[in-house]
Image (cartoon, rainbow, N blue to C red):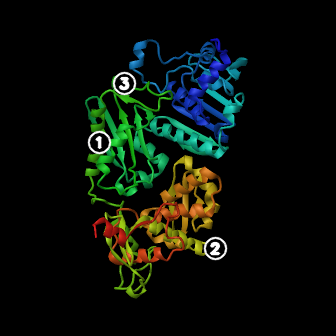
C-alpha cells in the first residue's frame, strides 16, 4: 500500500475517537471547557442520556467570533502557550481539539459572547463544518448544544446503549464534577426533569451533603492536613457505612476528579482491621498540590495522574485516614456496627432458651433430635462454619448459606410479605440515582419494598420484606435501594427473582460476623433444608466437603 495523507474529515473522526466514546465523554469535554473558562454557574440538559441532545450553558468568559472559529480547528487552545506550561497545568484540559473532535461527530450549535463585547455570535456546525453563522443575543458566556451524536459515524452509533444506561454514565460523570467544584452553581435536567439544583458553597462538606443528603454525610469523619506543600480536606466513612463496591471512593486533585490509583490502595491499610472481606471504605479526598509535583498528561482524558513523589503522597493520605479512624474506637474485624445490630434488633438475635433462636432470618425453634447426621463444631475465621457429618467434614460459607436461605424463603410465596413501618424512613440518594430508583418502585413493591418519591433527591420508605425488616433496619436501607437502582439501570425492568437476590444479599450475615452456637446450628439447619443448598443465589458454592477417606489419606492412615 502507498502512504497518503488522510482527509481532514477522517483525521477529525480519529481524534474524536480518542476523546468521545459516548455521550458522557462529550458532556465531560464541554463541562470542563466551561469550568476552565471560569464559569460560576452551569446548566446541563440531557435527552436520551445526551445521545439525542446535550446542552451546556455557562456564564464564563465567552469567546469572540474569531476565537469560536479557532476553537473548531484542531491543535488550538487557550490553556497553553509554551512547552514550559505543560509542567504547570492548572486547567482540567488543554489538548485544544476536544471541541473540534466533538463537533466532528455531531450536529452542533454554539452561541457565545466574550466579556466586553456588545453582542453574542452564533455558529451552526455539522460534522465539523460551519454551515451557518450570524450575530445573536446572549449574556456573557457560552452555550453549546449537541444533537444526534455519531450521526455520521454509524459504526460508533450502533454501540451506544439504551438511553437509560447512557444517562447513568453521563449523570455519574457529572456527579464527580459537581463534587469536585463546590464553588460552582449547578442545574442539571434529564428528560425534562430537574435532577439537581445546588447553590455554590466554599465548604466541600456542604457540597457532599447537597448531593448525598445529611443522613450519610453527617457520619463522615473529617480531617484537615497541611504539610510540605500538600493540603488535604478529607472525609472518611466509618466502617459501619462501608460499601460492597468501590463506587464511593473519590479523589479530587486541585478541583480535578481523578482515579485514586495508588492513593486509593494505600487507604485500605488503615481500614484493614475494621472491615470484613468484600467491604470497601467510603472516602472523599479534596487534595491540593503544587502542579510541579504531579503529571496530568498521562491519560488522553486526564482521568489518571502520576505523582513525582508518590511515596510521600501515599504516606500523607494514609496518615490522614489513620487520624480519622483514630478519632473513634472500633473493634477489630468490626462488621460495620454488628454489635449495635444485635442490640437494636432485640429479641431477633437473643437466645430465649436452650432450644430456641428467635427470628432474624434464622430458625425460630429446633431441638438436637431434629438434626440428622451432622453437628456444628464451631466457627472458623469469623466467616465459615465447620460441620461434622457422618461421612466427613463440611466447611460452610455462612454468608452464602444465609443468602440461599433468605432467597428461597421469598420463592415459597407468590408475594413477599411486607413489614409496614409506623414511621416512614427518609432515604436521600445521589441525583444520578433518583430516576432509576423512581422507575424501579413498582418492581420493588412486588418484592415487599414500599417506596415513594418525596421530592428532590429524597424518597420515603414505608415497608420492607418482612423476613428481612428487623435486621435490615439495623444495617440501613440505603445501600440495597441503590443496588436495586443499579440493577434496574443495567437491564431495564429486572425480573423479581433478580431484585430479590440483591435485597436478600444485603441482609445475609457477613463474613466476620460472630454467631453464637445456637445461631450457627440454626443457620446450618435451615441451609440444609433448602431445595438447592449447593450454591448461593449468585451461583457461588456454599460449602466444600472433605470425606473421611480424604482426611484419613491426608494423614497417612
Q: For the residue carrying disc 2, how many other residues have a C-alpha within 10 Å: few (<14), some (14-19), or many (20+)?
A: few
**Distance in Å between CA atoms under marks 1 and 3:** 21 Å
Give the x, y percent position of residue 493: 65, 56
Judging depth in this view, the residue of 495 and 198 nearest the camera is 495
Residue appearing at x 40%, y 49% in the figure: 282
> In which quadrant of the rendered view does residue 71 lie?
top right
Q: For the residue carrying disc 1, how many other residues have a C-alpha within 10 Å: few (<14), some (14-19), or many (20+)?
A: many
Secondary element type, mark 3: helix
Name the residue furthest bottom: 369
Give the x, y percent position of residue 174: 54, 39
**Distance in Å between CA atoms under marks 1 and 2:** 50 Å
Give the x, y percent position of residue 460: 55, 61
Residue appearing at x 37%, y 56% in the figure: 277
Q: Which residue is mark 2?
A: 414
Horizontal arrangement in the rendering, residue 207 relative to residue 493 (left or right): left
Give the x, y percent position of residue 131: 74, 18
Horizontal arrangement in the rendering, residue 352 relative to residue 128 (left or right): left
Q: Which residue is mark 1?
A: 318
The answer to whether one can see residue 80 in this image is yes
Secondary element type, mark 2: loop
Amino acid at each position: 500500500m502507498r502512504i497518503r495523507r488522510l482527509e481532514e474529515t477522517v483525521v477529525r473522526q480519529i481524534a474524536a475517537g480518542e476523546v468521545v466514546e459516548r455521550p458522557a465523554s462529550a458532556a465531560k469535554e464541554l463541562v470542563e471547557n466551561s469550568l476552565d473558562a471560569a464559569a460560576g454557574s452551569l446548566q446541563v440538559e440531557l435527552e436520551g442520556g445526551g445521545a439525542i441532545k446535550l446542552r451546556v450553558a455557562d456564564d464564563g468568559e465567552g469567546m469572540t467570533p474569531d476565537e469560536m472559529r479557532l476553537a473548531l480547528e484542531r491543535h488550538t487552545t487557550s490553556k497553553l502557550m509554551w512547552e514550559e506550561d505543560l509542567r504547570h497545568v492548572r486547567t482540567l484540559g488543554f489538548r485544544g481539539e476536544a471541541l473540534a473532535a466533538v463537533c466532528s461527530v455531531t450536529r452542533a450549535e454554539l452561541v457565545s459572547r466574550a466579556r466586553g463585547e456588545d453582542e453574542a455570535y452564533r455558529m451552526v456546525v455539522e460534522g465539523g463544518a460551519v454551515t451557518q453563522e450570524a450575530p445573536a443575543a446572549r449574556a456573557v458566556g457560552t452555550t453549546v448544544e449537541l444533537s444526534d451524536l455519531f450521526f455520521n459515524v454509524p459504526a460508533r452509533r450502533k454501540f451506544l446503549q439504551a438511553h437509560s444506561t447512557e444517562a447513568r454514565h453521563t449523570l455519574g460523570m457529572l456527579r464527580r464534577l459537581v463534587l469536585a467544584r463546590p464553588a460552582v452553581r449547578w442545574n442539571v435536567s434529564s428528560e425534562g426533569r430537574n435532577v439537581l439544583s445546588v447553590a455554590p458553597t466554599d465548604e466541600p462538606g456542604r457540597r457532599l451533603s447537597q448531593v448525598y443528603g445529611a443522613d450519610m454525610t453527617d457520619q463522615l469523619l473529617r480531617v484537615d492536613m497541611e504539610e510540605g506543600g500538600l493540603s488535604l480536606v478529607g472525609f472518611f466513612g466509618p466502617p459501619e457505612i462501608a460499601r460492597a463496591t468501590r463506587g464511593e471512593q473519590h479523589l479530587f486533585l486541585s478541583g480535578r476528579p481523578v482515579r485514586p490509583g495508588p492513593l486509593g490502595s494505600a487507604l485500605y491499610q488503615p481500614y484493614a482491621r475494621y472491615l470484613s472481606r468484600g467491604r470497601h471504605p467510603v472516602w472523599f479526598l479534596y487534595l491540593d498540590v503544587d502542579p510541579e509535583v504531579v503529571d496530568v498528561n498521562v491519560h488522553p482524558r486526564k482521568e489518571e495522574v502520576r505523582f513525582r513523589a508518590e511515596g510521600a503522597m501515599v504516606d500523607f493520605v494514609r496518615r490522614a485516614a489513620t487520624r480519622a479512624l483514630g478519632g473513634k474506637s472500633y473493634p477489630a474485624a468490626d462488621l460495620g456496627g454488628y454489635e449495635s445490630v444485635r442490640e437494636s434488633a432485640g429479641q431477633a438475635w437473643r437466645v430465649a432458651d436452650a432450644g430456641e433462636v428467635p427470628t432474624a432470618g434464622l430458625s425460630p425453634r429446633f431441638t438436637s433430635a431434629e438434626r440428622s447426621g451432622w453437628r456444628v463444631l464451631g466457627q472458623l475465621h469469623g466467616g465459615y462454619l465447620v460441620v461434622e457429618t457422618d461421612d466427613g467434614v463440611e466447611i460452610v460459607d455462612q454468608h452464602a448459606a444465609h443468602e440461599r436461605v433468605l432467597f428461597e424463603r421469598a420463592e415459597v410465596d407468590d408475594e413477599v410479605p411486607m413489614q409496614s413501618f409506623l414511621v416512614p424512613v427518609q432515604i436521600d440518594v445521589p441525583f444520578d440515582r433518583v430516576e432509576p430508583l423512581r422507575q424501579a418502585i413498582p418492581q420493588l413493591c412486588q418484592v415487599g419494598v414500599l417506596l415513594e418519591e418525596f421530592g428532590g433527591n429524597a424518597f420515603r420508605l414505608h415497608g420492607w420484606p418482612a423476613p428481612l425488616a428487623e435486621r435490615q433496619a439495623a444495617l440501613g436501607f440505603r445501600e440495597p435501594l441503590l443496588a436495586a437502582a443499579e440493577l434496574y439501570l443495567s437491564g431495564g425492568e429486572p425480573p423479581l427473582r433478580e431484585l430479590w437476590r440483591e435485597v436478600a444479599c444485603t441482609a445475609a450475615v457477613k463474613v466476620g460476623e460472630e454467631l453464637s452456637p445456637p445461631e450457627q446450628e440454626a443457620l446450618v439447619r435451615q441451609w440444609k433444608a433448602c431445595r438447592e443448598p449447593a450454591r448461593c443465589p449468585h451461583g457461588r458454592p456454599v460449602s466444600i466437603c472433605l470425606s473421611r477417606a480424604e482426611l484419613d489419606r491426608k494423614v497417612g492412615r
